[in-house]
Amino acid sequence: MENESLIQIKNLKKYFPAGGDWFAQIFDRRQIRAVDDVSFTIPKGTTLGLVGESGSGKTTVGRMIARLMNPTSGQVFFKNVDLTHLNTKKQKWIRRSIQMIFQDPSSSLNRRKTAGQIISEPLKIHKFVPKEELEDKLVSVMKLAGLSQRFINRYPHEMSGGQRQRVGIARALAIDPEFIICDEPVTALDVSIQAQIINLLMDLQDELNLTYLFIAHDLSVVKHVSKKLAVMYLGKIVEMANTDMIFANPQHPYTKALLAAIPTPDPKAKKRKVLHGEVPSPISPPSGCRFHPRCPEYIGDICKNEIPPEVTQPDGGFVSCFHYCQQ
Protein backbone atom coordinates (compact mmCIF):
# COMPACT_ATOMS: atom_id res chain seq x y z
CA MET A 1 0.00 0.00 0.00
CA GLU A 2 1.32 3.42 -0.95
CA ASN A 3 -0.01 5.05 2.20
CA GLU A 4 1.92 2.68 4.45
CA SER A 5 4.84 4.52 6.07
CA LEU A 6 8.11 2.79 5.28
CA ILE A 7 10.32 5.35 7.07
CA GLN A 8 9.43 7.28 10.21
CA ILE A 9 11.78 9.86 11.74
CA LYS A 10 10.97 11.11 15.23
CA ASN A 11 12.70 14.04 16.95
CA LEU A 12 16.05 13.23 15.34
CA LYS A 13 19.07 15.19 16.60
CA LYS A 14 22.77 15.11 15.79
CA TYR A 15 25.26 17.26 17.68
CA PHE A 16 29.01 17.30 17.01
CA PRO A 17 31.77 18.58 19.32
CA ALA A 18 32.82 22.07 18.25
CA GLY A 19 36.51 21.45 18.99
CA GLY A 20 38.74 19.89 16.36
CA ASP A 21 41.07 17.36 18.06
CA TRP A 22 40.46 15.56 21.36
CA PHE A 23 42.42 18.19 23.32
CA ALA A 24 40.27 21.03 21.95
CA GLN A 25 37.09 19.07 22.71
CA ILE A 26 38.02 18.84 26.39
CA PHE A 27 38.14 22.62 26.77
CA ASP A 28 35.51 23.58 24.19
CA ARG A 29 32.22 22.03 25.31
CA ARG A 30 30.15 23.80 22.66
CA GLN A 31 28.30 21.66 20.14
CA ILE A 32 27.49 21.97 16.45
CA ARG A 33 23.75 21.36 16.13
CA ALA A 34 23.78 19.84 12.67
CA VAL A 35 20.28 18.34 13.00
CA ASP A 36 18.02 19.66 15.73
CA ASP A 37 14.68 17.89 16.27
CA VAL A 38 13.59 16.69 12.83
CA SER A 39 10.51 14.51 12.24
CA PHE A 40 8.86 13.18 9.07
CA THR A 41 7.47 10.04 7.44
CA ILE A 42 7.91 8.62 3.94
CA PRO A 43 5.11 6.41 2.59
CA LYS A 44 6.13 3.32 0.69
CA GLY A 45 6.70 3.82 -3.03
CA THR A 46 6.98 7.62 -2.81
CA THR A 47 9.75 10.22 -2.78
CA LEU A 48 10.36 12.89 -0.16
CA GLY A 49 12.54 15.76 -1.33
CA LEU A 50 14.76 17.28 1.35
CA VAL A 51 16.09 20.68 0.32
CA GLY A 52 18.07 23.55 1.81
CA GLU A 53 21.35 25.44 1.59
CA SER A 54 24.70 23.75 2.14
CA GLY A 55 25.20 23.12 5.84
CA SER A 56 21.50 22.87 6.65
CA GLY A 57 21.85 19.25 7.86
CA LYS A 58 20.32 17.37 4.90
CA THR A 59 23.14 14.88 4.36
CA THR A 60 23.47 14.26 8.10
CA VAL A 61 19.81 13.20 8.20
CA GLY A 62 20.40 10.79 5.33
CA ARG A 63 23.51 9.31 6.94
CA MET A 64 21.68 8.69 10.21
CA ILE A 65 18.87 6.86 8.41
CA ALA A 66 21.45 4.72 6.59
CA ARG A 67 23.13 3.99 9.95
CA LEU A 68 26.40 5.50 8.77
CA MET A 69 26.12 7.84 11.73
CA ASN A 70 24.57 7.45 15.18
CA PRO A 71 22.03 10.08 16.25
CA THR A 72 22.52 12.08 19.44
CA SER A 73 18.86 11.43 20.22
CA GLY A 74 15.64 10.60 18.44
CA GLN A 75 14.43 7.53 16.57
CA VAL A 76 14.59 6.13 13.04
CA PHE A 77 11.94 3.54 12.20
CA PHE A 78 12.03 1.26 9.16
CA LYS A 79 8.86 -0.84 8.84
CA ASN A 80 8.10 0.08 12.48
CA VAL A 81 11.48 -1.29 13.62
CA ASP A 82 13.59 1.21 15.61
CA LEU A 83 17.01 1.19 13.93
CA THR A 84 18.75 3.28 16.58
CA HIS A 85 19.18 0.40 19.04
CA LEU A 86 19.85 -2.60 16.79
CA ASN A 87 22.83 -4.87 17.32
CA THR A 88 25.42 -5.47 14.59
CA LYS A 89 23.76 -8.63 13.26
CA LYS A 90 20.38 -6.98 12.82
CA GLN A 91 21.96 -3.88 11.31
CA LYS A 92 23.33 -6.08 8.52
CA TRP A 93 19.76 -7.01 7.64
CA ILE A 94 18.83 -3.34 7.55
CA ARG A 95 21.71 -2.54 5.21
CA ARG A 96 20.19 -4.92 2.67
CA SER A 97 16.98 -2.91 2.69
CA ILE A 98 18.42 0.62 2.92
CA GLN A 99 21.04 1.82 0.45
CA MET A 100 22.60 5.17 -0.46
CA ILE A 101 23.64 6.89 -3.68
CA PHE A 102 26.36 9.42 -2.95
CA GLN A 103 26.87 12.91 -4.35
CA ASP A 104 30.29 12.58 -5.95
CA PRO A 105 30.81 9.36 -7.92
CA SER A 106 34.53 10.11 -8.22
CA SER A 107 35.13 9.91 -4.48
CA SER A 108 32.48 7.31 -3.58
CA LEU A 109 33.92 4.60 -5.86
CA ASN A 110 37.11 2.66 -5.15
CA ARG A 111 39.56 3.74 -7.86
CA ARG A 112 41.47 0.44 -7.58
CA LYS A 113 38.46 -1.72 -8.38
CA THR A 114 36.62 -2.28 -11.64
CA ALA A 115 32.93 -1.52 -12.06
CA GLY A 116 32.17 -5.23 -11.84
CA GLN A 117 34.07 -5.60 -8.56
CA ILE A 118 32.41 -2.51 -7.07
CA ILE A 119 28.87 -3.62 -7.95
CA SER A 120 29.38 -7.25 -6.92
CA GLU A 121 30.92 -6.38 -3.55
CA PRO A 122 27.57 -6.04 -1.67
CA LEU A 123 26.40 -9.28 -3.34
CA LYS A 124 29.39 -11.09 -1.84
CA ILE A 125 29.19 -9.45 1.60
CA HIS A 126 25.52 -10.32 2.03
CA LYS A 127 25.85 -13.68 0.21
CA PHE A 128 22.90 -12.53 -1.85
CA VAL A 129 23.21 -15.12 -4.63
CA PRO A 130 25.17 -18.37 -5.07
CA LYS A 131 28.61 -17.97 -6.64
CA GLU A 132 27.51 -19.59 -9.88
CA GLU A 133 24.75 -16.95 -10.27
CA LEU A 134 26.90 -13.95 -9.36
CA GLU A 135 27.84 -12.96 -12.92
CA ASP A 136 24.25 -13.20 -14.17
CA LYS A 137 23.05 -11.02 -11.30
CA LEU A 138 25.85 -8.52 -11.95
CA VAL A 139 24.93 -8.18 -15.63
CA SER A 140 21.25 -7.86 -14.72
CA VAL A 141 21.88 -5.04 -12.23
CA MET A 142 24.13 -3.19 -14.65
CA LYS A 143 21.41 -3.37 -17.28
CA LEU A 144 18.92 -1.91 -14.80
CA ALA A 145 21.25 1.05 -14.25
CA GLY A 146 21.72 1.59 -17.99
CA LEU A 147 25.26 0.19 -18.12
CA SER A 148 26.51 -2.06 -20.89
CA GLN A 149 28.24 -5.31 -19.99
CA ARG A 150 31.42 -3.94 -21.60
CA PHE A 151 31.94 -1.71 -18.54
CA ILE A 152 32.47 -4.67 -16.17
CA ASN A 153 36.27 -4.50 -16.38
CA ARG A 154 36.60 -0.71 -16.54
CA TYR A 155 37.96 1.38 -13.70
CA PRO A 156 36.21 4.58 -12.52
CA HIS A 157 38.82 6.84 -14.13
CA GLU A 158 38.04 5.25 -17.49
CA MET A 159 34.40 6.34 -17.32
CA SER A 160 32.52 9.62 -17.59
CA GLY A 161 30.78 11.22 -14.61
CA GLY A 162 27.39 9.92 -15.69
CA GLN A 163 28.73 6.39 -16.16
CA ARG A 164 30.39 6.47 -12.74
CA GLN A 165 27.11 7.55 -11.15
CA ARG A 166 25.35 4.67 -12.89
CA VAL A 167 27.88 2.35 -11.26
CA GLY A 168 26.91 3.90 -7.90
CA ILE A 169 23.24 3.35 -8.69
CA ALA A 170 23.89 -0.24 -9.73
CA ARG A 171 25.79 -0.86 -6.49
CA ALA A 172 22.80 0.46 -4.51
CA LEU A 173 20.38 -1.74 -6.48
CA ALA A 174 22.49 -4.91 -6.26
CA ILE A 175 20.88 -6.38 -3.14
CA ASP A 176 17.29 -5.36 -3.98
CA PRO A 177 16.75 -2.58 -1.40
CA GLU A 178 13.35 -1.11 -0.59
CA PHE A 179 14.57 2.35 0.38
CA ILE A 180 17.31 4.44 -1.25
CA ILE A 181 18.79 7.71 0.02
CA CYS A 182 19.81 9.84 -2.95
CA ASP A 183 22.30 12.35 -1.57
CA GLU A 184 22.48 15.05 -4.26
CA PRO A 185 23.04 12.35 -6.92
CA VAL A 186 23.14 14.78 -9.88
CA THR A 187 24.93 17.81 -8.40
CA ALA A 188 28.36 16.81 -9.72
CA LEU A 189 27.08 16.03 -13.23
CA ASP A 190 26.59 18.08 -16.40
CA VAL A 191 23.08 19.42 -16.92
CA SER A 192 22.42 17.13 -19.91
CA ILE A 193 23.43 14.08 -17.86
CA GLN A 194 21.38 15.21 -14.84
CA ALA A 195 18.14 14.70 -16.76
CA GLN A 196 19.19 11.18 -17.77
CA ILE A 197 19.99 10.17 -14.19
CA ILE A 198 16.78 11.69 -12.83
CA ASN A 199 14.70 9.88 -15.47
CA LEU A 200 16.55 6.65 -14.65
CA LEU A 201 15.76 6.98 -10.94
CA MET A 202 12.09 7.66 -11.68
CA ASP A 203 11.86 4.66 -14.01
CA LEU A 204 13.52 2.43 -11.41
CA GLN A 205 11.05 3.61 -8.77
CA ASP A 206 8.10 2.64 -10.96
CA GLU A 207 9.64 -0.67 -11.98
CA LEU A 208 10.91 -1.80 -8.57
CA ASN A 209 8.46 0.05 -6.26
CA LEU A 210 11.33 1.87 -4.56
CA THR A 211 11.03 4.55 -1.89
CA TYR A 212 13.40 7.55 -2.04
CA LEU A 213 14.71 10.30 0.18
CA PHE A 214 16.00 12.74 -2.44
CA ILE A 215 18.42 15.27 -0.95
CA ALA A 216 19.21 18.41 -2.97
CA HIS A 217 19.81 22.13 -2.72
CA ASP A 218 18.22 22.84 -6.11
CA LEU A 219 14.42 22.95 -5.95
CA SER A 220 14.09 22.73 -9.72
CA VAL A 221 15.63 19.24 -9.55
CA VAL A 222 13.44 17.78 -6.79
CA LYS A 223 10.31 19.23 -8.40
CA HIS A 224 10.36 16.44 -10.98
CA VAL A 225 11.06 13.53 -8.66
CA SER A 226 9.34 14.19 -5.33
CA LYS A 227 5.71 14.09 -4.31
CA LYS A 228 6.41 15.94 -1.08
CA LEU A 229 9.03 18.49 -0.03
CA ALA A 230 10.67 19.26 3.30
CA VAL A 231 12.66 22.49 3.52
CA MET A 232 15.53 22.56 6.03
CA TYR A 233 17.27 25.57 7.51
CA LEU A 234 20.04 25.37 10.09
CA GLY A 235 19.14 21.88 11.32
CA LYS A 236 15.35 22.30 11.39
CA ILE A 237 12.53 21.68 8.93
CA VAL A 238 10.77 25.02 8.45
CA GLU A 239 8.16 23.91 5.91
CA MET A 240 6.77 20.64 4.61
CA ALA A 241 4.05 20.25 2.00
CA ASN A 242 3.14 18.64 -1.30
CA THR A 243 5.60 19.67 -4.01
CA ASP A 244 2.93 21.25 -6.20
CA MET A 245 1.66 23.26 -3.23
CA ILE A 246 5.10 24.61 -2.38
CA PHE A 247 5.84 25.69 -5.95
CA ALA A 248 2.40 27.24 -6.39
CA ASN A 249 2.14 28.93 -3.00
CA PRO A 250 5.24 28.78 -0.75
CA GLN A 251 4.55 29.83 2.83
CA HIS A 252 7.82 30.22 4.71
CA PRO A 253 10.01 33.24 3.78
CA TYR A 254 13.01 30.93 3.41
CA THR A 255 11.14 28.69 0.96
CA LYS A 256 10.15 31.78 -1.02
CA ALA A 257 13.80 32.84 -1.15
CA LEU A 258 14.92 29.42 -2.41
CA LEU A 259 12.30 29.47 -5.16
CA ALA A 260 13.24 33.02 -6.13
CA ALA A 261 16.86 31.89 -6.52
CA ILE A 262 16.01 29.40 -9.29
CA PRO A 263 17.49 30.79 -12.54
CA THR A 264 15.09 31.56 -15.38
CA PRO A 265 15.98 31.69 -19.10
CA ASP A 266 13.61 34.61 -19.69
CA PRO A 267 15.69 37.81 -20.13
CA LYS A 268 12.60 39.92 -19.40
CA ALA A 269 11.93 38.23 -16.08
CA LYS A 270 11.94 40.32 -12.95
CA LYS A 271 15.21 40.67 -11.10
CA ARG A 272 15.62 37.83 -8.62
CA LYS A 273 15.38 38.58 -4.93
CA VAL A 274 18.67 37.84 -3.25
CA LEU A 275 18.69 36.46 0.29
CA HIS A 276 21.01 38.74 2.25
CA GLY A 277 23.22 37.84 5.18
CA GLU A 278 25.28 34.78 6.04
CA VAL A 279 23.96 31.52 7.43
CA PRO A 280 24.42 31.71 11.24
CA SER A 281 26.78 29.31 12.96
CA PRO A 282 25.17 26.02 14.07
CA ILE A 283 27.34 26.26 17.20
CA SER A 284 25.30 29.21 18.47
CA PRO A 285 22.11 29.40 16.39
CA PRO A 286 19.89 32.49 16.76
CA SER A 287 17.27 32.50 19.47
CA GLY A 288 13.61 32.21 18.52
CA CYS A 289 13.12 31.61 14.81
CA ARG A 290 16.51 30.65 13.39
CA PHE A 291 15.78 32.45 10.14
CA HIS A 292 14.88 35.80 11.72
CA PRO A 293 18.29 37.54 11.19
CA ARG A 294 17.87 37.10 7.40
CA CYS A 295 14.08 37.17 7.12
CA PRO A 296 12.56 39.85 4.85
CA GLU A 297 9.21 39.37 6.66
CA TYR A 298 10.64 39.77 10.18
CA ILE A 299 7.87 40.86 12.57
CA GLY A 300 9.77 41.83 15.70
CA ASP A 301 10.51 40.53 19.18
CA ILE A 302 8.25 37.50 18.79
CA CYS A 303 10.44 36.20 15.94
CA LYS A 304 13.59 36.97 17.90
CA ASN A 305 12.59 35.48 21.24
CA GLU A 306 10.09 32.67 20.62
CA ILE A 307 10.29 29.46 18.62
CA PRO A 308 7.53 29.43 15.97
CA PRO A 309 5.09 26.52 16.25
CA GLU A 310 4.32 24.14 13.38
CA VAL A 311 1.15 25.49 11.79
CA THR A 312 -0.75 22.75 9.94
CA GLN A 313 -1.54 23.42 6.28
CA PRO A 314 -4.59 22.24 4.25
CA ASP A 315 -2.61 19.47 2.52
CA GLY A 316 -1.49 18.02 5.86
CA GLY A 317 1.93 19.67 5.81
CA PHE A 318 3.12 22.46 8.08
CA VAL A 319 5.02 25.74 8.20
CA SER A 320 6.98 27.12 11.16
CA CYS A 321 6.31 30.84 10.93
CA PHE A 322 4.48 33.35 13.14
CA HIS A 323 2.79 34.88 10.08
CA TYR A 324 0.44 31.89 10.01
CA CYS A 325 -0.32 31.63 13.73
CA GLN A 326 -3.80 32.56 14.92
CA GLN A 327 -3.72 35.86 16.71
Image: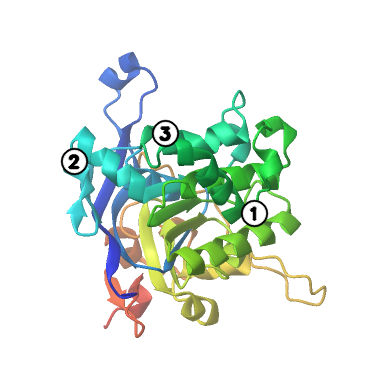
* Left or right for 196, reference 172: right
Residue 144: x, y in percent?
57, 55
Q: Which residue, given by chain and number where applicable, does mark 2 sit on?
A: 86
Q: Please state which of residues 104 and 304 is positioned toward the viewer in this rendering.
A: 104
Residue flagged by tag 3: what amino acid is it?
Answer: Lys
Residue drawn at x 70%, y 65% is 263
Residue 209: x, y in percent?
43, 66
Label 2 secondary element: loop
Could you tell me if residue 71 is visible in this image?
A: no
Q: Please state which of residues 39 and 209 is positioned toward the viewer in this rendering.
A: 209
Residue 258: x, y in percent?
56, 64
Q: Which residue, given by chain and number where applicable, does mark 1 sit on?
A: 146
Residue flagged by tag 1: what amino acid is it?
Answer: Gly
Q: Are marks 3 and 2 in contact (CB under 8 Å)?
A: no
Disc with the residue nearer the chain's start (1 vs 3): 3
Q: Are marks 1 and 2 in contact (CB under 8 Å)?
A: no
Q: Which residue, given by chain and number where applicable, does mark 3 sit on?
A: 124
Please rate how many residues cluster around mark 1, counting C-alpha atoms within 10 Å: few if below 14, some from 14 to 19, many from 20.
Answer: some
